Amino acid sequence: MSEPKSPGPASPETKAAEPKQEVPVLAYPLGAVGAVFGAAAGVLVMKLGADSGFYAELAIGILSGLGAGWLAKRGGWGVGAIAGLVTAVAGVWAEWKFGWRWNADSSLEYFVKHLGELPGFRLLIHAVGVAAAVWLAARQ
């Protein structure tokens, strides 16, 4: 008895007939809007946490990633990168506004220039927040 032949590689005609997955035109702008709204909610959570003595920086990344993926209605690394960028900017702003203070100067410019002097734990939490935003938005 002869064994059934497995189908070989797809022919050019078969490949051409397969529908291509297209990215919806509004996926990235909607992902950006979702990331901004999620980050704003995360900043609010961080503010409420800071008022209670709790460091809730991760909320910015988590809510930004969930908002980006949910509003874009699709995942992917592009949407994840947008969520990560929004999280990084919102996290630095929130840290300046509600978190760490330097006695020398309280301006945002001074804070950004000396961002690397933050305690290692805070920098780690910022990085984890950005990674969470990217992963949560990309996996949707």
Image (spheres, helix red, strand yellow):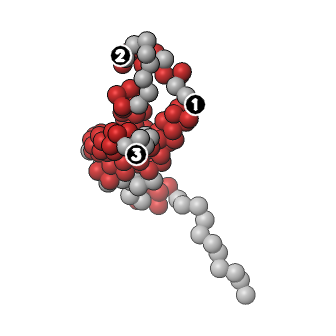
Is any part of residue 8 visible from this angle? Answer: yes
3 and 2 marks in contact (CB < 8 Å): no
| Residue located at (44% from left, 41% from top) | 55
Q: Distance between the residues labelled 2 and 1?
A: 21 Å
How far is the residue under mark 3 from the one under mark 2? 24 Å
Q: Nearer the viewer, residue 59 or 100?
A: 100
Viewer-proximal residue among 4 and 51:
51
Q: Distance between the residues labelled 1 and 3?
A: 19 Å
Disc assigned to residue 69: none
Say whether disc 1 or disc 3 marks the residue closer to the N-terminus.
Answer: 3
Instruction: Give the residue number, with chain letter if any, for mark 1.
Output: 120
- Say which of 104 and 31 sits in front: 104
Q: Where does residue 98 sit, x and y in percent of width and height?
A: 36, 31
Please identify, in this view, whether the residue under mark 3 or under mark 2 is nearer the observer.
Answer: 2
In the image, which disc is placed on residue 107? 2
Badge 1: how crowded within 10 Å, few (<14), some, or many (20+)? few
Position in image of residue 65 (x %, y %): 39, 47
Q: Quick one: SS at disc 1?
A: helix
What amino acid is found at the position of numbered circle 2 in the picture?
Answer: Ser
Q: Quadrant of residue 84?
A: top left
> Is residue 124 positioned above or below 76 on the image?
above
Q: Residue 136: give x, y in percent of width and height.
A: 44, 50
The amino acid type of the residue labelled 1 equals Gly
- Does residue 64 appear in the picture of this structure? no
Picture layout, residue 17 above or below residue 111: below
118 vs 20, nearest the viewer: 118
Give residue 59's mark: 3
